[in-house]
Amino acid sequence: MSNFHIILPEDSDLDLTYPWLDNLQPPGIYNMSTTAMHDSSARDPPPRCRPGTRRSTLNKILTFVEDPEPNDSEVVLWMHAPAGYGKTAIMQSVIETLVASGRRHYIAGGFFFGRDVLVEGVGRDKAHNLLPTILYQATKNIPGMEERVRKAIVANERALLQPIDGQACLLVDSFEHYVPQSKHTPTPTIFIDGLDECDTPAAQYAVLGVIQDVVLRRLPLRFVIASRFEYHLHQRFTLAPLCPVTRSFELSRNYYSEVYYAKLKYRRWRAGSSQESKPSNTKKGQKSTDIGIVWL
């Protein structure tokens, strides 16, 4: 990627060089969070779907992302489930699948919220880190986006230092009137994992507020969002303007059972047991009363 050279107006009193646009940005500068990216070393190894699992869910998301002529009434896909159902692994696997298959340009960017680790003082739980991180990835993933982002920053030179609602102009200016290079290329998708892990409900509302702005402006962007089913999030997704453009689905307990069974088999193997059969007191298709899963 070529380096950016930001030239501010002569009368500007803002002394910023935006080193993150030169691919030299250390964590914590100008609100970009490198730890929240799908390929961040801070998350290595990230959770992934086991080979051959979650096929239905992965295909559902990939179909939404890859459609070159999407239904204009559906630009947001919300996947929700309780903790431990593998939402992050699914989001990671979708992004890695697109990158590995040469479709990186389908990805505007990805952000994995989390409250677990601080790396050099930078966490993954702040809303104001979201858009700078997404825009940085867009310059790497989407042909022609470098110049568009550069112009947006020059035109809104203080935006990166503001809360997320003040940064929204950068996303708008970068993607307004953007047209994919080929009619067979879908509009880019922003992946947001763990929205419920974002700092506070107010901050989560602010993130959804930016998405609402994108929807109302009909910008060429799609969103795939994964989170727990929190009532305040559900409420926002079921009200205009998000409700008419959102498709939501819940990961079923069957998917959780699949993961649980895989873990159980692994524990038995580690314990030296050669018995991989299902519990004798649990019939096929019948719920187990002791561990609460359904064998498939």
Image (cartoon, helix red, strand yellow):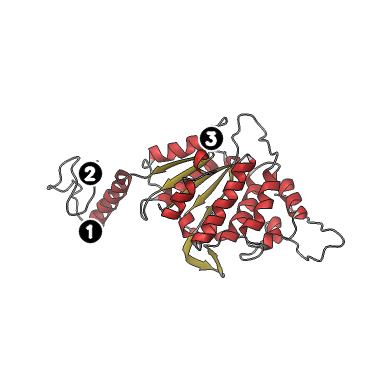
Q: Is residue 40 visible?
A: no
Judge from the rendering whether residue 16 lies leftward or rightward of residue 127; answer left or right.
right
**Secondary structure under the numbered disc 2 in the rendered image:** loop
Residue type at mark 1: give it: Ala
Question: Whole-Å distance between the Cαs marked 2 and 3?
Answer: 37 Å
Question: Whole-Å distance between the Cαs marked 1 and 2?
Answer: 21 Å
Image quadrant containing the C terminus: top left
Closer to the chain start, of discs 3 and 1, is: 3
Closer to the chain start, of discs 1 and 2, is: 1
**Residue hosting label 1:** 271
Q: Residue at x 54, y 51 (%)?
A: 208
Q: Is residue 9 visible?
A: yes
**Secondary structure under the numbered disc 1 in the rendered image:** loop
Disc 2: CA contacts within 10 A as few (<14), some (14-19) or many (>=20): some
Q: Nearer the viewer, mark 1 or mark 2?
A: 2
Question: Whole-Å distance between the Cαs marked 3 and 1?
Answer: 52 Å
Q: Residue at x 53, y 35 (%)?
A: 73
Residue type at mark 3: give it: Ser
Q: In which image quadrant can residue 21 be found?
A: bottom right
* Residue 156: x %, y % from top left: 74, 55
Q: Which mark is residue 112?
A: none
Residue type at mark 2: give it: Trp
**Residue hosting label 3:** 73
